[in-house]
Image (cartoon, rainbow, N blue to C red):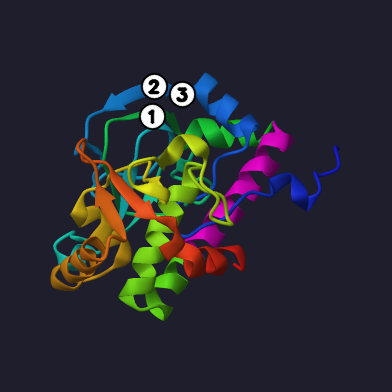
Amino acid sequence: MQNPPPPHAYSSMVIPWIVPRVPPCIENWIRAKSQRRSYKARDVLLNETQPYDRLFFISSGVVAQGVVDASLYTKPLAINLFTGGRLMGTLNIITAVPSPRKLIALTDVEVYICSHRLVREELLTDLDLTLALMGYCELSAKSELIGMEVLFSMEPQKRLEILFSVLLLSDGTVDLNGRICSENRSAALGETYAKLPYTLPREAMRSVLYLSKSSFDRLLCDWSHSKGFVRDAEGDMWVDVERLTNALKWIREH
């Protein structure tokens, strides 16, 4: 038997609400074994009444995964975001326990879909893939845990700062120290502004932050009036990264 890889083999940036990118070995495997599908914004990839019995690899775009409580008329209580390079559906690959979730495309997306059955068959014969997937599941769980920490330990203002930071970090627009990639700067707005890689619907942002509509609208309005973010003529949102210094420090330390 091969020796398992050292822990650093699974090292990846872990941030709230958006799980890390998959290792290349998992991405290559799932692209080769899966069915590719395209969805338009607001399409439903999976309803809460359907079994969550497959993996979804996000090749491009943004998908929201809503946690559902059937006693509340199947209304999503909170959501996580999955962007390009991320893998959904790792909750119950082995156990197959019921895990109701609603998956909704927030932008146009391309995904690769693979059944849990096929994954289980592969895991029995490929130790390297098994260890890589185990490591990825651990990092994903850590991402969800620190996301919960943000929701239940921070005031709304700090939650929004974390969300803007996470969106910028997830696509490499900024690094953990707040340095902006040159192509994501705006000469018109100033060198401290960076463009969000995704302009999310207001309701999706509100759900991620777990705020009431009135609280979220007031918070977003305050940020807009103080130029914490601005929108350009194309509707893209640019965020003042200097306003995210404390949020980025918190993420670095977790």
Q: Magenta residues?
A: 126-145
Check disc 1 and report its element: helix, strand or loop. Answer: strand
Q: Quadrant of the C terminus?
A: bottom right
Disc ID at residue 36: 2
Q: Give, as a three-letter code, the residue at label 2.
A: Arg
- Point out which mark residue 34 bears: 3
Q: In the rendered structure, are the residues bearing label 1 and label 2 in contact, judged by CB atoms less than 8 Å apart?
A: yes
Horizontal and vertical percent position of residue 161: 39, 65
Q: In the shown orientation, is residue 123 left or right of residue 146?
A: right
Q: Verify whether residue 136 appears in magenta.
A: yes
Whether the magenta-drawn stretch holds residue 216 is answered as: no
Question: Nearer the observer, disc 3 or disc 2?
Answer: 2
Q: Which residue is mark 1?
A: 111
**10 Å crowding of disc 1: few (<14), some (14-19), many (20+):** many
Residue at 63% x, 49% y is 12
**Are the two marked residues, 3 and 2, in contact with CB atoms closer than 8 angstroms?**
yes
Q: Residues within 10 Å of mark 2 (few under 14, many from 20)?
A: some
Residue name at image x 43 percent, y 41 percent: 185
Which residue is more in the foreground, 101 or 160? 160
Please tell me how crowded label 3 is: few (under 14), some (14-19), or many (20+) other residues with Cα within 10 Å: some
Residue at (70%, 32%) from the top-left corner? Answer: 126
Q: Position of residue 108 (x, y in %)?
A: 27, 31
Say what secondary structure mark 2 lies in.
strand
C-alpha separation, residue under disc 3 versus residue under disc 2:
6 Å
Can you tell which of label 1 and label 3 is closer to the viewer?
1
Q: What's the CA distance linking mark 1 and mark 2?
A: 6 Å
Query: Given the image, on which type of amino acid does mark 3 rest?
Result: Ser
